[in-house]
Amino acid sequence: MKVQKNLNKINFLKKIFIKICRKFGFEIIDQSNFYIPTQEKNLNENLSIPKIKSIIIPLGETKITRPVNELTIIFRSCTSIKMLTQKKNRLFEKDKQEYTFRSLNSIIKSLNYAKRYFSKTKFKIVVIDHNSKNEHLDQIKNQLDRSNVEYNIINLNINEFSNKIKKTNAKNEIVTANQISNMSNIYKSLIEAKNHCKDLIYFVEDDYIHEVKAINEMIFTYERLSSQIKKELILCPTDYPYLYSNIDATNIFLGLNKHWRKIDQSLCTFLTSKKMLEKHWLKFVSMCEFEHYPFETPLHEIYKTEYCLSPIPSLALHCTNINSIFGISPNIEWKKLWDNNNDYK
C-alpha cells in the first residue's frame, strides 16, 4: 500500500507541475514515449500554436511577433487561352478548363485544411476571370458555393488598362493580345489587393495544383520566419526545375514541415503581404505596364532586397509542358496530386 500511495503522490505532483508549465507557456517533453503532456500531443504532431508560438523539434520555440490575421487568395482564371506564350501542350494534355477546375479545387481543399488550425484567421477567395465561357464560370461558382469560404468573382474588363500597357515590349516586338489580357489581369489583381486586402495575399494562376497542406504550411512558415527575421516575406509555393540548373549560393530556412530556400527568380504565383505590396508598388505595377524580358524582371528586382523563398519539396504542381524549366517539380507525386483533384464536380 505504501508503494501505491507514493505513486499516487508522484502522479498528483506531476499533474500540478504540468498545469503550472501550461499556465506559463512552457512545454514538457517526455522522451520515453515521445509525448508532450502540456499539449497532450505526440512529438510527430503539429506542436505550433497559430499567432502565439512555433515549435519545431529539436530547435525549440519561436515566439510569433508577426501573426497572420487574414489571407486573401486572388485566383486569376482564363479558360479560353490554352497556353499564354507557347504552342506546346500542357502536362496531361487536357483542355484548359480542366486545369482551372482542378487548381481551384485544390485551393479550396487546402484552405479548408488550414482553417482547422487557423480558426481565428479570415479567409477569402477572389476570382478575377477573363473571357471564360459561361458554363465554365458556372462551374467555378458551383465549386465556390460548396467551399465554405467567402468569395467574390470579378469579370475582367481589359479596356480598363488599355491606355496603361505599352504596346511594344522589351524585344521591340508588338505585345500579343494574350499577353495584354494577362498583364491586365495581374494589374487588376494588384489593385484589388491594395484596395481591399488587409494582410496576406496569395496571387495564383489557374494552372497550379496544390497539396492539401500547402496553405497551412505557407501560413505557419510565414508567421515563424517573419517573426525570426523581423521582415515581411514573399513565398513561392513551387520548387521549379530551373532552380537546379545552376549551382547558386542560397540560404536555407526551416518551416513547419518543409525546408525553404532563398531564390532570386519566380513566376507570378506567390504569397506576400499588403505591406510588401505597398512598399514596392511601383515595381509591381511596372510588370503590368511594360512587357519585360523575362516578364517577371520587376519581381526579380524586388528579390534583391527582400526574401523570396520556395519550398523543398514543392507544395504545388505547375501544370505547364513537361519539358519546361518552370514545370514539374522534382520529388513529388505529381500524378497522384492531379488525380486527387478530380472530385470538383
Image (spheres, grey):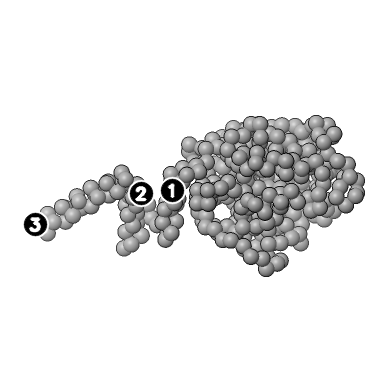
Q: Secondary structure at mark 2?
A: loop
Q: Secondary structure at mark 3?
A: loop
Instruction: Name the residue carrying label 3.
Output: 1
User: Which mark, by number, is residue 39?
Assistant: 2
Using the numbered discs, state the Cα–Cα distance from disc 3 to disc 2 in whole angstroms. 32 Å
* Residue mark closest to the camera, 3 vs 2: 2
Q: Nearer the viewer, residue 239 or 332?
A: 239
- Identify residue type, mark 1: Lys
Instruction: Name the residue carrying label 1.
Output: 63
In the image, what residue occupies the spot 71% across and 61% down? 242
- Identify residue type, mark 3: Met
State if disc 2 and disc 3 touch (CB < 8 Å).
Answer: no
Seen from this angle, which residue lies furthest left?
A: 2
- Crowd class of label 2 (few under 14; some 14 to 19; many from 20; radius 10 Å): some
Q: Nearer the viewer, residue 92 or 250?
A: 250
Is residue 138 something that shows in the picture?
no
In the image, what residue occupies the spot 76% across and 62% down? 323
Lower position in the chain sequence, tag 3 or tag 2: 3
Q: In the rendering, at what x and y percent does residue 253 appear?
A: 54, 58
- Identify residue type, mark 2: Gln
In the image, what residue occupies the spot 63% across and 51% down? 306
